Amino acid sequence: MPLIPCQRALFEIPADVAYFDCAKMAPLLRTAAEAGERGLRRKSRPWEVHAGHFFDEAERVRTSYAGLIGATADDIAIIPSVSYGMATVMRNVRIAPGQTIVTLADDFPSGIYAARALANDNEARVVTVARPEADGDWTAALLEAIDGSTALVVSPHAHWIHGTRIDVEAVARRCRSVGATLVLDTTQSMGALPLDLAAVDPDYMIAASYKWLLGPYSLGFLYVAPRHHGGRPLEEGWITRKGADDFRSLAGYSQELEPSARRFDMGERSNFALLPVAGAAIAQLREWGVAAIAETLGATTDAIAARLADHGIDALPGRAPHFLSVRYRTGMPDGIEARLAAANVHVSLRGETMRITPHLYNDADDIDRLVAQLAPSL
């Protein structure tokens, strides 16, 4: 597959900035920022906002995201955050006293807090799977932890700290074999790492948009497998009811929810500023293609890892192609993150690792500057 050439011109990134922190927050595309500005201005002329506008933008974005992941629009709910998605999922998971919820160590807090709350409310138990330091094969350890007592598995596709890629197809097969529900947090992978939705067939899959989906903050997506479309939403909103597009009948208080994942939409989902941003970003991702993005970012992270290894900085094994977490053989230098930022080279420290997460806006000069700043730290 041919690599995608550098796309820096599509972003507002100054020449003197080397930004390697997409896992924290992606910069907006120029087209996405412009779409958001146009959407925000609509609120200054509310007499031009009509009933259909509360539905059409949401449906366009919902449909486009569904196309990105290989789902249908009926399978997608629009949500504000991963924690909202997790709360929705937990409301619809049945768990008996003594059963277990399996999670990964050091996983992102939204899933962990939700799992612990569900366990506490039902006298269940959370099983935390540690990362195997020897080979980093977290998938094997996760599969071993899933057994007949498992009611729910909460897993990422790529771990947000270590960048470890989880074989979610294997995890899904194990979940089905024991009757466990599988919820995937794909915030650190969706848009940058291919996932065969039909092969995985998760029960639920959540992604915030502000990282690898290149979208806005406070907007995300919840995939709900068709078998769960009859579940109970987190909110009792008006727009998730049948007939909501007839504003004259809203005071009739329909009790009939949408027969699709739309019933799980957040309140005020018709965000005229954020939805256009997400829509423009998803359109660009689909044009590039997720497989091509992964291939290109994999070449970039491989090149960085090889150069850093020559300076005593090692990449953690088992990583996803778009993700590079490294450790200094002599220990993390004090003040390294701040010193890099002062030089306009931006990464993140998470635990004992340095997280280096490029995107298509990074070029060879960025990589040279990154390596030059890290190598003298030894």
Image: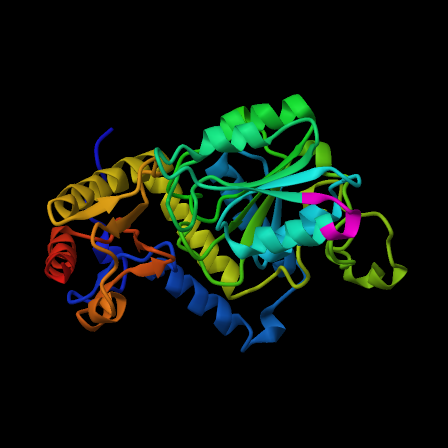
Using the rendered view, name the quadrant where residue 136 is placed. top left
Q: Residue at x 56, y 74 (%)?
A: 43
- Indicate the position of residue 205 as horizontal and vertical percent values: 57, 41
Placement of 45 over or under 2, stated as above or below: below
- Indicate the position of residue 269 as horizontal and vertical percent values: 63, 59
Q: Residue at x 42, y 50 (%)?
A: 160
Is 88 or 80 nearer to us in this picture?
Answer: 88
Is 198 or 342 nearer to us in this picture?
Answer: 342
- Indicate the position of residue 316 as horizontal and vertical percent values: 30, 42
- Indicate the position of residue 65 as horizontal and vertical percent values: 51, 44
Placement of 97 over or under 248, stated as above or below: above
Residue 121 lies in the magenta stretch: yes
Q: Residue at x 62, y 55 (%)?
A: 113
In this figure, which colouring scheme has been used for the structure? rainbow
Q: From the image, which quarter does the N terminus lie in?
A: top left
Q: How many marks?
A: 0
Residue that lies at the very extreme toward the bottom in this rendered image: 44
Residue that lies at the very extreme toward the right in this rendered image: 252
Position of 198 with respect to 308 (left or right) is right
Q: Residue at x 13, y 45 (%)?
A: 307
Residue 56 appears in the figure:
no
Position of 24 with respect to 233 (left or right) is left
Residue 230 lies in the magenta stretch: no
Position of 214 with respect to 229 (left or right) is left
Placement of 235 over or under 338, stated as above or below: above
Placement of 22 over or under 225, stated as above or below: below
Is 296 or 83 nearer to us in this picture?
Answer: 83
Position of 362 with respect to 252 (left or right) is left
Q: Which residues are magenta?
A: 120-125
Q: From the image, which quarter does the C terminus lie in?
A: bottom left
